[in-house]
Image (spheres, rainbow, N blue to C red):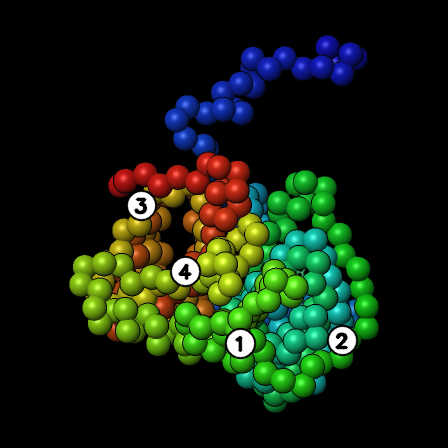
Amino acid sequence: MNAAGVAPLWPMMRNLLPHKRPIATTKSHHWAFADLRPLLLRAGQLTPVEKAERRVLVLSDPGRGVGSMQATASIYLGMQLLLPGETAPAHRHTPSAARVIVEGEGGFTIVEGEKLPMQEGDIVLTPGGRWHDHAHEGDKPVIWLDALDLPLFVYLEGSYAEEAPLQARRNRPDASEVEYLAAGLRPPRSPSAPTAQYPMMRFPWRRTREALHAMAKHAGAETVELDYVNPETGQAVLPALGFAALMLRPGEVVRPALRSTSEVYHVVHGKGVAMVNGERMRWGPKDTISIPVFSEVTLSADGEEAFLIRIHDRPLQEKLGYYEERPR
Ligand code: 1HN
């Protein structure tokens, strides 16, 4: 068989198709920001951004071992540092990225000429194939969490990049401050001018937080959660990855259904406890937790309100036709 380049299916069949539910390689993990921050700042002293291109510490899935370039099967996570005055050169690549801003002021990403300011809790998109570079006009370090659908592109042998010098910047605020300032309003479209595929690439945290607060006032026993959507289509903001913002009221306990997605929770504000498949994790501001497929998750906030951003691969799974939720 070896010589003929074939192998028997039957000893492998149950590995490929386990009974009733998948077996996750991914192991849930809690990355405390307090552990990552000093390592990242040390990397800032040792590694010039000119050499690194991107100065990033990758959050490695313990289920895949030391040095793994992914946090779950579909989600790459990295904590990136840009120091005052630094720039990270323009490139574009097949995978899509989104950044959640963790610390600092004065940083921004330029995507296809649009300057997207980075404020704590903001989500900034750099969709696949779009030129993007980073710069920093503030006076303290800026740190953000990169989330990419990179593992998928590597698996598909579809991952590559092109490089270029820094982009020229259009001198106007980004679309979240102009065309899409208010929910439910957008500029008129003419048949001859097709809509941009990614019309809004920055989601300011200030507005997300305000929206969650308003929901919380009238939510009763409902979970207070909002999906980030493309304001032209109502669809997910990127092709493979989705984003949601979750508010936990003081002392609230949330038990989501079991989902076929792998996920990541990033804490914007507050403290609490996560139980993931029986494992207890205490989380605080700026921490990050990975969640394997079909996990039993219970999130509880301490005595003050908490805000988390959930990153997941539901858009990909819906395109493939297998997204699923199961009751607890
Ligand atoms: C990337 O383009 C960035 O632009 C960060 O900041 C991390 C990891 C893998 C591939 C591309 C960035 C990345 C990346």
Q: What amino acid is at disc 3?
A: Ala
For marks 4 and 2, the one nearer the N-term is 2
Whichever of labels 3 and 1 marks the residue nearer the N terminus, that label is 1
Query: Mark 3 or mark 4, which has the lower sequence index?
Result: 4
Nearer the observer, 241 or 16:
241
Q: Earlier in the sequence, mark 1 or mark 4?
A: 1
Q: Are marks 2 and 1 in contact (CB under 8 Å)?
A: no
Quickly name the residue at label 1: 179
Amino acid at dot 2: Gln
Where is residue 77 drawn, in percent x and y? 56, 57
Q: Is mark 4 within 8 Å of ligand 1?
A: no
Residue drawn 47% across the image and 47% down it: 314
Q: Is residue 222 left or right of residue 113?
A: left
Residue under circle 3?
257
Image quarter of the C terminus: top left
Mark 4 residue type: Asp
Query: Which residue is tagged 2?
Result: 167
Of the four image quadrants, the one with ligand 1 is bottom right
Q: Position of residue 249 (x, y in %)?
A: 25, 68
Q: Secondary structure at mark 3?
A: loop
Please name which of the two marks, 2 or 3, marks the residue nearer to the observer. Answer: 2
Residue marked by disc 4: 227
**How many residues crowd mark 4 within 10 Å: few (<14), some (14–19), many (20+)?**
some
The verdict on label 3 being within 8 Å of ligand 1 is no
Q: Earlier in the sequence, mark 2 or mark 1?
A: 2
* Element on which disc 1 rests: loop
Q: Is residue 168 above or below residue 221?
A: below
Judge depth for marks 2 and 1 and give the one in front: 1
Whole-angstrom CA distance, mark 4 to mark 2, is: 31 Å
